[in-house]
Image (cartoon, grey):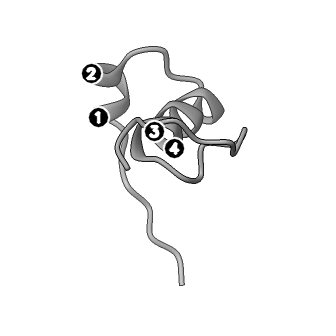
Amino acid sequence: MLGGPSDDPFGGLNLVGGLRRSMAKAGYCDLKEFQKVGLTVGG
């Protein structure tokens, strides 16, 4: 569940893969910098 093997290349099946993909899409390279990002919730 967290970082286990997955056959999904987009990081949608495990937490670590999803975090890595979202950081890359946002342009951040380390977790500390990513944690300081403001959160915007749209509805």
Q: In this figure, which residue is indicated by the disc labeled 3?
A: 19
Q: Where is residue 43 in the image (x, y as percent from the top left)?
A: 54, 84
> Which residue is painted at 59% across and 35% down in the image?
21
Task: Give the mark nearest the N terminus, 1 or 3.
Answer: 3
Mark 4 touches mark 3? (CB < 8 Å): yes
Q: Which residue lies furthest to the right in this view?
A: 9
> Which residue is painted at 27% across and 21% down in the image?
32
Q: Distance between the residues labelled 2 and 4?
A: 16 Å
Q: In this figure, which residue is indicated by the disc labeled 4?
A: 18
Q: Nearer the viewer, mark 3 or mark 2?
A: 3
Q: Is mark 2 on a helix, strand or loop?
A: helix
The dot on residue 12 is none
Mark 4 touches mark 1? (CB < 8 Å): no
Q: Where is residue 15 in the image (x, y as percent from the top left)?
A: 41, 46
In terms of depth relative to the viewer, which is nearer, 6 or 38?
Answer: 6
Task: Give the mark nearest the N terminus, 3 or 2.
Answer: 3
Q: What element carries label 3?
A: helix
Mark 1 touches mark 2? (CB < 8 Å): yes
- Looking at numbered disc 1 in the image, what kind of residue is underneath it? Gln
Task: Give the mark nearest the N terminus, 2 or 4.
Answer: 4
Q: Nearer the viewer, mark 2 or mark 4?
A: 4
Q: Where is residue 4 in the image (x, y as percent from the top left)?
A: 43, 37
In terms of depth relative to the viewer, which is nearer, 19 or 43?
Answer: 19
The dot on residue 35 is 1
Q: Is mark 1 on a helix, strand or loop?
A: helix
Q: In this figure, which residue is indicated by the disc labeled 2?
A: 32
- Looking at numbered disc 4 in the image, what kind of residue is underneath it? Gly
Horizontal side of 33 relative to 6 (left or right) equals: left
Task: Give the mark nearest the N terminus, 4 or 1.
Answer: 4
